[in-house]
Image: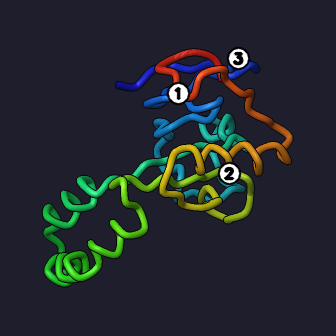
Amino acid sequence: MPATFVHRDGTEFIAEGLAHGIPIDPRMPEGFDDTPNDARPPSHGKWWYLPFIRTETIEAMDAFYAQRTDEYAAAGRAHWRENRAKWLDAWPSGTRYDVRCLDGGAWDRSTNWGSFPTLEQAVECALTRGADMNRIVCAMPDAVTPGGTL
């Protein structure tokens, strides 16, 4: 269940969780990953230089392909059937953790810093690369908190 987190600068974020100060599955503003950086509205501003983690599960992928109705749905489902086992080989827990950050590395979306098989590896990436940013997230004393302060 989403919770509200407050960054030390007072900015509020809604996310599913927080791991060592890194938002997990945050709610992003509309158009966040398809807006040119030079045309971003103020609602995107709080995300500059703040890494976050998005999760992708095998169940979500299965549902995505099962529910497709576009003209490429059949080909998409066939591709997924052929590659599902490879996906699970790479992400054996059934969850992929993607680290992203709006850092200007891409002209119209947040930059993908990497995909990891564990939350711990994703957090390490976010903290390590995030430490070089102007806006460092603070470490939390516990691994994942349902609400609190960034």
Label 3 close to label 1 by CB (< 8 Å): no
**Mark pair 2, 3: CA separation:** 24 Å
Q: Is residue 110 left or right of residue 55?
A: right
- From the top left corner, tell me how far across and down residue 38 is, in percent: 72, 56
- From the top left corner, tell me how far across and down residue 125 is, in percent: 68, 51
- The image quarter containing residue 45 is top right
Q: Earlier in the sequence, mark 3 or mark 1?
A: 3
**Quadrant in which the C terminus is drawn:** top right
As drawn, 19 above or below 6 = below
Residue displayed at 53% across by 58% down:
116
Residue displayed at 57% across by 15% down:
148
Pointer 2: residues within 10 angstroms few (<14), some, or many (20+)? many
Q: Earlier in the sequence, mark 1 or mark 2?
A: 2
Assign a secondary structure to mark 3: loop
Label 1 close to label 2 by CB (< 8 Å): no
Q: Is residue 17 left or right of residue 68?
A: right
- From the top left corner, tell me how far across and down residue 7 is, in percent: 68, 22
Q: Is residue 93 left or right of residue 3?
A: left
User: Label 1 belongs to which residue?
Assistant: 144
Q: How many marks?
A: 3
Look at label 3 and name its amino acid: Gly
**Mark pair 3, 1: CA separation:** 20 Å
**Mark pair 1, 2: CA separation:** 16 Å
Look at label 2 and name its amino acid: Cys
User: Label 3 belongs to which residue?
Assistant: 10
Assign a secondary structure to mark 2: helix
- Between label 2 and label 3, give the one nearer the viewer: 2
Look at label 1 and name its amino acid: Val
User: Label 2 belongs to which residue?
Assistant: 125
Q: Earlier in the sequence, mark 2 or mark 3?
A: 3
In front of the other: 85 or 29: 85
